[in-house]
Each structure stands twice: as C-alpha cells, then as structure tokens.
Image (spheres, grey):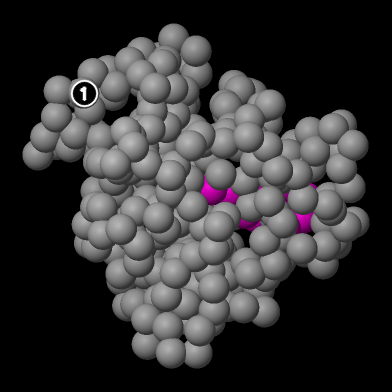
C-alpha cells in the first residue's frame, strides 16, 4: 500500500504540466566514483555537521547571492536537517574538502543492505531524474541536455539518472531558482529504465549496483515515478520508498537528513 506521508508530500510537489515533446536516444556514460566497498555512513551531525553547515552558508552568501533554494538547511537537535537537490550538491562541494561525499543512490542501498544506518522516519535526495528538456523544470532540464550534447551524447529515450555527488552548482539569474546544475568530470550519467513512468507503483526490496530498484512483486518498498517529462528529484522517503516523479526541486522540510559517506578501512 502506498505510504500516506509520501503521497501527501507528492501531492504538494506535483506539477501537472506534461508537454508531449521527447528528446532522442541516449547511451549511458559511466564515470569514476568514490570507493564504497568499505565505506562508512552517518548523518551530518555533531561538531562536524555544524562546521560543514557554517562553510555551506558562507558559500550561499558569498557565491550564490543567498539563493532561496539553498536556504533550506538548519542545525537542530545536534544534526543538520532538510534536503533538496540544490542544497545537497553544494554540501557535497564542502564535504569533498573533508574527504567525504553526499550519499549516492548506490551508497544508500549498500547502507541499507548492511543495516549501517537507520534511515526510517527521514527523507533525503540522492540524484536527478532527467526525462526530457520540457517541464517540469524545463529551464534546468534544457540546460542539462545542452551540456550532455556538448559532450557528444544524444539525450532521450530511457530516463537518465545523475547522482548529486558528481554535480556542481552555477549561479544563473535567468533560472527560476537562480541556479543551474553543472556536469563535471566526475558526473555519473546513468540510463535508468527502472524510473520510467510505466514502472510507477512497482515494488522492490533492494537496489542494483547503481542503486536502482530491482523489482519484485512481493517487495516491501514502492517506486513512485508518475512523470514522463522534464527534470525531477530522486528522493528516498521515511518508509524507504523511492520517489522519482517530483518536479518541485527546492522544497525541503524538517525530516530531511544528509547521509555522509567516507572511505572506510579494510576489515
């Protein structure tokens, strides 16, 4: 049965504008990514969390002109709270200076498999879901498509998933959020047919080597992918369900948590 809290949130996030134009086929691009074989997982909390948030806020003020989409994080109860894709991309920039990174979809699935961190009752973003250069978020989607094409890739066909940990932010006064996502040499561009609209409400228990759902009829988790266009957020909810159909990228609330990864030591 769908998670009522997730559905309630999805209703607030829903963008009903669904243009019909589609882009052209794409081939997957696999870039290098941080080692996760012995990675450790934790929330962004304590003195380290406070320090990272202070550095983050300095960047928001100094480089991004206090863009409202970035002013969504708080430090309360000794932990950083809130989550949206813009904030997590910028947080990752700070975390990289400390040898850590914001969890990617595959990191979250491995953490769950190992029971390494209790994610229930929290939500968090881990990637972007690109379906076309139309709405929702047509400006941002078109910008990403242009970047991909400039690297020689024809975008379209299957859904593309991009983990947040490989992106950067650029200030853009013409963007609805005054921000655009920037591909880097470490960006992972992953074709993700699992996130097609046709798989909306399918069940799964775990993810594959890219962190994408492995569907099972008797699975205990649900994929919500009720969108066929534009750019959406990839977001895990408090019941460990996965949302890939929300186009409201800036939205954040207090149950959001930053999952931080670091390379561990061999057992």
Measured from the top left, where is residue 100 in percent x and y?
38, 28
Numbered disc total: 1
- Residue 121 shown in magenta: no
Measured from the top left, where is residue 31 in percent x and y?
68, 37
Number of residues whose C-alpha sits closer than 10 Å to that of mark 1, classed few (under 14), some (14–19) or many (20 or more): few
Left or right placement of residue 135 versus residue 9 in this view: right
Quadrant containing the N terminus in the rendered view: bottom left
Secondary element type, mark 1: helix
In the orientation shown, which residue stands out farthest toward the front? 267
Q: Which picture quadrant has residue 178?
A: top right
Magenta highlight range: 127-139
Q: Residue at x 41, y 37 (%)?
A: 102
Measured from the top left, where is residue 68 in percent x and y?
43, 31
Question: Is 173 above or below relative to 21?
Answer: above
Visible in this render: residue 194?
yes
Visible in this render: residue 94?
no
Q: Which picture quadrant has residue 221?
A: bottom left
In the orientation shown, which residue stands out farthest toward the top? 62
Question: Is 160 above or below relative to 55?
Answer: below
Residue of label 1? 48
- In depth, the one of 97 and 82 nearer the eye is 97
Left or right placement of residue 184 versus residue 12 in this view: right
Quadrant containing the C terminus in the rendered view: top left
């Amino acid at each position: 049965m769908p998670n009522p809290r997730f559905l309630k949130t999805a209703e607030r996030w829903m963008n009903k504008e669904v243009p019909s134009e589609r882009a052209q086929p794409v081939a997957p691009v696999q870039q290098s990514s941080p080692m996760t074989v012995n990675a450790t997982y934790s929330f962004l909390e304590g003195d380290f969390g406070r320090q990272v948030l202070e550095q983050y806020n300095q960047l928001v003020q100094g480089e991004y002109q206090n863009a409202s989409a970035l002013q969504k994080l708080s430090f309360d109860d000794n932990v950083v709270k809130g989550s949206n894709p813009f904030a997590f991309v910028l947080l990752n920039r700070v975390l990289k200076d400390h040898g850590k990174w914001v969890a990617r979809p595959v990191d979250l699935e491995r953490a769950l498999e190992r029971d390494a961190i209790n994610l229930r009752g929290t939500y968090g973003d881990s990637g972007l879901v690109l379906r076309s250069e139309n709405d929702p978020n047509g400006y941002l989607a078109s910008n990403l498509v242009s970047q991909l094409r400039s690297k020689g890739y024809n975008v379209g066909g299957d859904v593309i998933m991009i983990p947040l940990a490989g992106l950067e932010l650029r200030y853009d006064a013409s963007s609805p959020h005054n921000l655009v996502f920037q591909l880097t040499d470490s960006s992972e561009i992953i074709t993700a047919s699992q996130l097609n609209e046709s798989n909306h409400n399918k069940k799964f228990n775990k993810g594959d080597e890219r962190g994408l759902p492995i569907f099972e009829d008797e699975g205990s988790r649900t994929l919500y992918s009720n969108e066929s266009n534009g750019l959406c957020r990839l977001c895990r909810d408090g019941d460990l369900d996965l949302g890939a159909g929300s186009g409201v990228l800036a939205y954040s609330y207090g149950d959001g948590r930053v999952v931080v990864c670091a390379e561990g030591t061999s057992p």
